[in-house]
Structure formats: structure tokens, C-alpha cells
Image (spheres, rainbow, N blue to C red):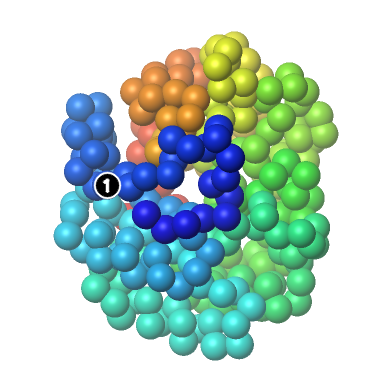
Amino acid sequence: MRDQDWITGPALAPLRRDFLLDEYRRLADAHGVTASVVVQTVTGPGETPELLALATASDLISGVVGWTDLTAPDIADRIAALAELPGGPKLVGLRHQVQSEPDPDWLTRPHVLRGLATVARAGLVYDLVITSGQLDQATRAAAAVPDLRFVLDHLGKPPIASGRTEPWAADLRRLAALPNTMAKLSGLVTEADWRRWQIADLRPYAEVALDSFGPARLVFGSDWPVCTLAASYPDVLEVARDLTGQLSPAEREAVFAGTATSVYGI
């Protein structure tokens, strides 16, 4: 386990252990999941090579969203070096913990935008892990780099525990209006009250996302193991199936498989 500065305090203590591939494989096998994209959590160079090595040894991992310094002058060389590692062909995207950046305009800094343009030229996707208050800068970044596909993680962390939908919903719709943006139906249970949440608490936010992006630009994500703070893996799957229950079979297939296959090229 790597120390991570966001895993602090007693509430997050259950996450301070190793979550291994065998544990995930048992869950995936039990619920018919045959392919997954794993996503970085550590802001540093050591984790991504480990995830790629894990991916090269497992058909269950079809893609890796890793990390490299977007502001580095040699970012193109760094991406190329990752692609040459064992498992490198499974590198499908990059992510940075923007949610932890103190500068509210970090995503639109010139050096960051230059880095994002390099990610686009490398043919990779950029995952956005941000808070709801950062949706505006994410929209500006996505507009500034139209050749890059942006995937919004956890629907931008809406304020579910408070029951409010605005200004999150308006900001989400502005991001979704850009054709190079997608979103993950993920991480909702941990934005709700961990102990008392119900599907009804999550539904208004899922409905806004479905209306804004449509099934063809939505991707299911389990957010395992972070989801275990509020719900089990099978619970999260069941919630997502319930929230998409009104969709046609083809639309549900898009959310649970087709969109991710297309966006991440897996």
C-alpha cells in the first residue's frame, strides 16, 4: 500500500490496506464483469508502471488510466516511456488529482493546457477527478483542447448529502454541451450520507447526467474499493442498474460496456 495524502482520519481507515487483484477478480467473476479500466490514485511516478505490469498479466484489466506530470516540459517523452513499459499498450489515459489542487484555475494554466494538448496528440483520454466547484474550469479546459476526450469521474462529485442539485446541474450541462466530454456514473454513494443513503437520494443526479450526456456518453464505474466506505461492490452494481432501468437494452449496454470500449479504445 502506498501512503496517500487524501486517505486520512478514522472515517477512511478501512481504505488503508492493500486491495489486490485476486480480491477484485472474485467480485468481478461473481457478477459477470469480464473487463475493467483501472485508474490511478497516487500523484507520483511510481504507481503507473505497477498498474501497467498488473494489466499485462491479467485479461481482466483492459486499460490503465495512469499519471504523469502534465506540466513537465518533456511530457511527450514521459508518455512515450510509459507506453514502452510492460503493459504499456494498455495505457489508455491519464489523470491528476485536480480535486486536491489549491489553485481553482489549475486546469487552465498555460503549462497544464499544453500538457493536455500533448495527451491528445498521444491518442490518450484524460480523466477529470474534480469537485463540483471545479466544473467550470473543467469546461474551459475541455473547450480549449477540443481534440482531447475528457471523461468526468464521479459526475463531478455532486452535493448529494445536502440534497442540492444547483449549481452542480447547470455546470454539468455546460460541460456536457461540449462534444469531447463524457462522464462516469460512479462514486455517487460516497457523495451521499454513507450510512443512510437510499437510491432515491441518488436518482436526481443520475437523471441530470443521463439527460445531459445521454447513454452514449456515460460510463459505469464501480469506484471500487473507495465505494466500500458506503456500499459493497454488488450494491453499487445494483444501484447503477436501478438508476438506468428506464433505458433500452442497447442504451444500458452502452453505459455498462459500449461507451467505455469506444472511449478508451479497449
Query: In what element is the residue under mark 1?
Result: loop
- The residue nearer to you, when weighing 249 against 2, is 2
- Number of marks in the rendered image: 1
> Which amino acid lies under the numbered mark 1 shown in the image of this protein?
Leu
Q: Is residue 189 left or right of residue 238?
A: right
Give the quarter of the figure containing the C terminus: bottom left
Classed neighbour count for the residue bearing mark 1: other residues with Cα under 10 Å, few (<14), some (14–19), many (≥20): few
Q: Residue at x 46, y 82 (%)?
A: 78
Residue 74 visible in image: yes
Q: Residue at x 72, y 63 (%)?
A: 107
Q: Position of residue 85 (x, y in %)?
A: 29, 77
Residue corresponding to mark 1:
20
- The residue nearer to you, when weighing 100 against 74, is 100
Q: Position of residue 170 (x, y in %)?
A: 79, 35
Q: Residue at x 32, y 44 (%)?
A: 19
Q: Is residue 211 left or right of residue 11?
A: right
Give the quarter of the figure containing the N terminus: bottom left
